[in-house]
Amino acid sequence: MPRTSSPVTNPVIPGFHPDPSICRAGEDYYLACSSFEYFPGVPVFHSRDLVHWTQIGNALDRPGQLRLPPGTPSSGGIYAPTLRHHDGRFWLIVTNVSGDGNLLFTTTDPAGPWSDPIPLPGVHGIDPDLAWDDDGTCWCTTAGVGQIRIDPRTGETFGERRPLWSGAPGAKAPEAPHLYHIGDYWYLLIAEGGTERCHGVSIARGRSPQGPFEPCPANPVLTHRGTDHPIQNTGHADLVEGPDGSWWMVLLGVRPHGGTPGWHVLGRETFLVPVTWSEGWPVVGELSTVLAPPPWPLREPAAPPVRDDFESGELASAWISLRSRPAENCTTKERAGWLSLRAAGESLDDPEVTFVGRRQQHVSCRARVLVDPAEGRGGLAVRLDEEHHYEIEVTPGEVRVLTRVGPFRSQVASRATAAGPVVLRIGTAVTGQVSDARQGPDTVSLGFEDPQGAFTELAALDGRYLSTEVAGGFTGRVIGMYAAAGTVHFDWFDYEPTGPDGPDRTGSAD
């Protein structure tokens, strides 16, 4: 239903949705994000108002499109797509850093199916971009920053990669290039400073897509480095024209919580910010957790259901697995209305573990699942990578809480339960007032419910150990179900926010 007056909450796509790339096709907007070691890869979203986004699929949803071998490390896999609409088709270019290099996919419907990959062996570097000149020449620009001409239909390259403008002299990690023809100029937008606290957005312009490029005198046009702003790590941006001819920027950022250095646990999220123009240069507006509504009707979709009953023959597009999802290990057909997971690895320490999860999108949330371990072993977990995860696991007659933090694996608690299905629960609660510089960003509680719904908490754990600042890498938390032995059955899965998305770094409300 259209709305025009309510403030907009930023991020517009919360949770682990980094490296956003956006394009417009008529009245419709589409956005794609990095997916790293998860399958299916590259979530694709649709919007009519730039504010409310609905996932319509995953571009890489077949093994032939996405090869993530068992040796693919966490934070490996699929990096930084660019999504464009040109000549009646949608084009997606992306890097698989775990073996296949740069790949290009096309479709006429961004909800899918997308084509098989077009290999780009002549394109080197991550973060590839696509831009077409007025005569139809296609330019591919990659991190570094360098450029080469390609035929996007065949993957053929022409000539040698030539360097372009790479941001401030000596700046770390010039990457995420995007090239646009706007008015009289070609604009080269890049990220620099690294994807941590020094991240920023800079821009240059020239009369040709090949340059030379003149840097904006106000660079970086957006950064929160050296500030106490509640949104940090701002960068990896993309520009798009709004429905009324105004300009907007999507970018990644994080929301740290707790004490020092501040820990972000949801990963890098997708934010929206307005852009105006002055003397031929973009001027980025204020990036805030509350955004003034844009001057056009908002189209808020129905709220997603709290519960997935697994009644459909196929899993919803929000569900992701680690590296692959073999049908023999993950099915809704073994028991009608249940998701059955067959173990492939012995624990979440194992890269081949059978796992089906969804991105955590709220700093305070609750996930519940009704699980029948049958003769197997499995449960509910919150995961950052193989070395950083908490889980509540059930076997016939026992529930226990397990943790993995770096090289240390522990059983924190256990409790005898009646045989048969049991409701497991994981909740997160964001830190309110920060009273100690060492205070973590949130508390993760793990336990189970009795048949009357009463909750027994077995452990309340510091959430900092499931944060990027501790674990490293590029991903965020994923909450989901797993099997570690035998076949484990799940009747339903609930996920819901349980409070506001928390304070800023100083402890005041966002």
Image (tube, rainbow, N blue to C red):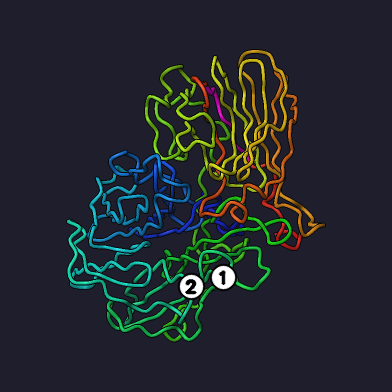
Q: In the figure, residue 422 lies in which quadrant?
A: top right
Question: Is 159 on the left-hand or right-hand side of 329?
Answer: left
Query: Measured from the top left, where is residue 202 in percent x and y?
Result: 46, 76
Could you say whether the residue bearing mark 2 is in a helix, strand or loop?
loop
**Image vertical order of residue 465 relative to residue 370, above or below:** below
* x, y percent for residue 427: 68, 38
The x, y position of residue 97, in whole percent, is: 37, 54
Which amino acid lies under the numbered mark 2 shown in the image of this protein? Answer: Lys
Which numbered circle lies on residue 198?
1
Q: Residue 509, image x and y in percent?
A: 73, 58
Classified by dominant secondary structure, the portion drawn in magenta counts as strand
Q: Which disc is residue 300 wearing?
A: none
**What residue is disc 2 on?**
172
In the image, taking residue 24 as reference, residue 495 lies left or right, namely right
Amino acid at the residue labelled 1: Cys
10 Å crowding of disc 2: few (<14), some (14-19), many (20+): some
Mark 2 and mark 1 in contact? Answer it, CB < 8 Å. Answer: yes
Quadrant of res 187 = bottom left
Q: CA distance from mark 2 to mark 1?
A: 9 Å
- Position of the C terminus, as image quadrant, is bottom right
Name the residue located 41 percent from the left edge and 70 percent from the top edge: 245
Residues rendered magenta in the picture? 489-496
Q: Earlier in the sequence, mark 2 or mark 1?
A: 2
Which residue sits furthest top?
Answer: 419
